Amino acid sequence: MRLMTMSFKGLYWQVNPTELNVEYAQNIRETTLPFAGSRLTDLGVKKRQVIGKGYFVGSTCMEQWRKLEELFREGGPGNLQLPGLEPFRAVLSGLRLLGEEGADIVKYSFAFTEVWAGESYRGQGVHRAEAGESLWDYAGRYGWDMELLRAANPHIRDIACLELGEEVFAP
């Protein structure tokens, strides 16, 4: 069986992670009742957590690491495709560069947290625009007030058509 490659926001892993854990859990609260023990309350399903480790190899290993690091700094949700699973929306919530002896190898660990459909995600920091995006896209995607977004980005000349790589600052 040949598994698909892992991908997130347009970054495709050349070598799938060596370790991949997908955690599904219920949100259960235990309430202690005086003189009566305790009671469990099911608060529903928690968001999936994806934790793993991997490596980049070859002469471009640091370049590949920097692309992953850039996605982390960019923040915000994207489609996460994992080997053997249906794609889902997630945020790259953790990233760690791990030391490893040897040339042309970069080991790392990562964590993703699921973002449910329709859920508001308040992005932060600096985002790099894709060709054809607009400030309206960012306002809708992150639930930002358009006037605050415009005020935070006075350098943008055309709010309806951003240039590739143009910086968009979170309000």
Image (tube, helix red, strand yellow):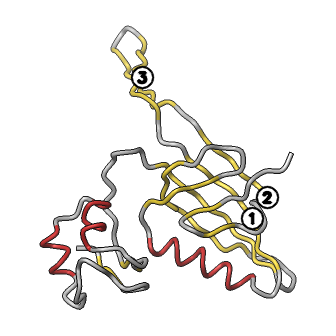
Quarter assignment of residue 162: bottom left
Amino acid tagged 2: Thr
Query: Which part of the image, by quadrant, shows the C terminus?
Result: bottom left
For the residue carrying disc 3, how many other residues have a C-alpha within 10 Å: few (<14), some (14-19), or many (20+)?
A: few
Numbered label attached to residue 54: 1
What residue did someone put label 2 on?
A: 18
Most extreme residue toward the top is: 36
In the image, residue 117 above or below residue 155: above
Q: Are marks 3 and 2 in contact (CB under 8 Å)?
A: no
| Side (left or right) of 158 relative to 80 | left
Q: CA distance from mark 3 to mark 2?
A: 34 Å
**Category of crowding for the residue at label 2, using alpha-carbon neighbours closer than 10 angstroms: few (below 14), some (14–19), many (at least 20):** few
- Report the front residue among 74 and 139: 139
Q: Which residue is mark 3?
A: 42
Query: Which is more N-terminal, label 2 or label 1?
Result: 2
Q: Position of residue 65 (x, y in %)?
A: 66, 78
Image location (x, y in percent) of residue 159: 23, 80
Q: Amino acid at mark 1?
A: Gly
Indicate the quadrant where residue 60 lies: bottom right
**Residue 153 left/right relative to 125:** left
* Amino acid at dot 3: Asp
- State the SS at label 3: strand
Note whether 18 is above or below 57 in the view shown.
Answer: above
The answer to whether the residue labelled 1 contacts the one labelled 2, judged by CB atoms less than 8 Å apart, is yes
Q: Nearer the viewer, mark 3 or mark 2?
A: 2
Tell me where residue 69 appears, x and y as whole percent. 57, 76
Q: CA distance from mark 1 to mark 2?
A: 5 Å
The reply to whether dot 3 and dot 1 touch (C-beta < 8 Å) is no
The structure residue drawn at horizontal position 68% and vertical position 59%, both measured from the top left corner, is 6
Q: Secondary structure at mark 1?
A: strand
Q: Earlier in the sequence, mark 3 or mark 1?
A: 3
